[in-house]
Image: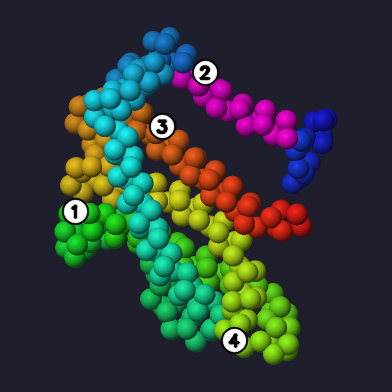
Amino acid sequence: MSTRGLFALRAPLPRTTSLALGFVMPALVLAAWCVASYGGLAPADFLPSPTEVIRGTLQLFLQYDLLEAILVSTRRIALAFLLASAVALPLGILMGAFTPVNRLFEPIVSPLRYMPISAFIPLLILWFGIYEKQKIAFLFLGVFVYLLPVVVTAIRAVPEEYVQTALTLGASRGQVIRTVLLPAAAPEIFDSFRVMNAISWTYVILAEAVNPEHGLGYMVELARTHQKASWSFAGLLVIGGIGLLTDFLIMTVSRLLFRWREASS
């Protein structure tokens, strides 16, 4: 492929070219990391070498049960995500389908998007204590405030002619929601789960920073108290790897559920 064709605006890339380009920046970052750490350009307590990070990761797995911490954090995220979806999906569908419902809830829900979620920690501690409920509530709030407007927007973005055609054919309002609005909005809503997944893994450390006894937040606190930069890097790599894995799983499920969208595109 020529350079002109390679940089054409919004043009698709051949699969091999796309895969090759995807490895360029990670390889450059790894090379710079190796040069800086192994070459002595940065002290070990500031930038540990890849070897030290691998050793630190093994230490966390073997000596401090990192696997259990991963499972604990994953369970908290999954539970909070299910609870947020159970509230945001039906409420978002009603807000998107019925303007009076939207006008009723929008003045309360809209400001939440502009409030830093971390500011709610003192209130959540007051209401739920410093144990499991507080962590689940924090993650729930972090997902809910972003998922709800996505659902509303996806429902309202369904072309009006679809709705009017269904009503003309005799469908009730409930049937229009079930057979027109939901199927048309489902791909966009499901795609937003990838963003919610990223938000959850971003917030989980903050949620577990309060009384860090278990989970990945505890591992981050452990690295801080022991002043182990290699453990901090290990935690970041583990969280990033889990995030990429779960993102891939969500994307794969989306492709399986909405094959018609892939075919049409």
Residue 104 location in percent, x, y?
A: 43, 84
Label 1: how many Cα within 10 Å (few below 14, some 14–19, many 20+): some
The Cα–Cα distance between marks 3 and 2, rounded to whole angstroms, is: 16 Å
Q: Is residue 261 visible?
A: yes
Helix, strand or loop status at disc 4: helix
Label 2: how many Cα within 10 Å (few below 14, some 14–19, many 20+): few
Residue 238 location in percent, x, y?
A: 39, 34
Badge nearest the viewer, 3 or 2: 3
The Cα–Cα distance between marks 4 and 1, rounded to whole angstroms, is: 43 Å
User: Mark 4 vs mark 1: which is more N-terminal?
Assistant: 1
Residue in the picture at 53% in, 71% down: 152
The Cα–Cα distance between marks 4 and 3, rounded to whole angstroms, is: 48 Å
Q: What residue did someone put label 3 on?
A: 237
Amino acid type of disc 4?
Answer: Arg
Q: Which mark is residue 173?
A: 4
Label 4: how many Cα within 10 Å (few below 14, some 14–19, many 20+): few
Q: What residue did someone put label 1 on?
A: 131
The Cα–Cα distance between marks 4 and 2, rounded to whole angstroms, is: 59 Å
Badge nearest the viewer, 4 or 2: 4
